[in-house]
Amino acid sequence: MNSICDRSWGINWIKIPKEVDVFALALKENNEIQGLVGVKNDVDVKAAYLHWACTAPHNNKHAYGRQKYSGVGGHLFAITVEKSMQWGYEGTVHGFALNKTLLNHYIEVLGATYLGALHPYQFFLDGDAARKLLEVYTYEWN
């Protein structure tokens, strides 16, 4: 775990709440981690709360100027959608984007809706958008 706990991931592991489950997106061939996502079962909202998501440094073109694999973020959203479905929320997801650029990306590419009630970059993904997302971003649990 030491290789993914460094600063380049942008995760403060100590501050992750106990109720947030962390999932890794890894290559089938060698288990090389491509991204991580923290998801919480938000019973009050009846949706999965995307607490945070990050791509591996070698996939983060914004921070490191390179991207080994594209679509990692979409796959991390797909994991969150699937957890929402398992919890009985029909794929609904909510969360807060890091900035306006990322929020617009979630809206344009992933089908999210701007919510903005609690935070200027708050988004929501409804069941229809969630199902469409799962058609594009597929993966296998292991």
Image: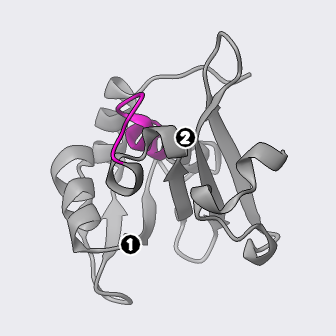
**Magenta segment includes 125:** no
Q: Which residues are magenta?
A: 65-78
Give the quarter of the figure containing the C terminus. Answer: top right
* Near-viewer residue (85 or 14): 14
Q: Quadrant of residue 122?
A: bottom left
Residue shown at 41% from the left, 44% from the top: 73
Q: Position of residue 55 (x, y in %)?
A: 50, 46
**Magenta segment includes 76:** yes
* Near-viewer residue (16 or 44): 16
Q: Which residue is mark 2?
A: 79
Residue farthest along the front direction in this orientation: 65
Residue shown at 34% from the left, 65% from the top: 124
Q: Which residue is mark 1?
A: 98
Give the quarter of the figure containing the N terminus. Answer: top right
Q: Position of residue 20 (x, y in %)?
A: 72, 64
Q: Position of residue 108 (x, y in %)?
A: 15, 51
> In the rendered view, would you say 35 is above or below 29?
below
Q: Nearer the viewer, mark 1 or mark 2?
A: 1
User: For this view, does 142 lie left or right of residue 109?
Assistant: right
Q: Earlier in the sequence, mark 1 or mark 2?
A: 2
Residue farthest along the bottom direction in this orientation: 118
Residue shown at 45% from the left, 46% from the top: 77
- Cα gap from disc 1 to disc 2, whole angstroms: 19 Å
Mark 2 lies on a secondary structure that is helix
Category of crowding for the residue at label 2, using alpha-carbon neighbours closer than 10 angstroms: few (below 14), some (14–19), many (at least 20) = many
What amino acid does circle 1 point to? Answer: Leu
What amino acid does circle 2 point to? Answer: Ile
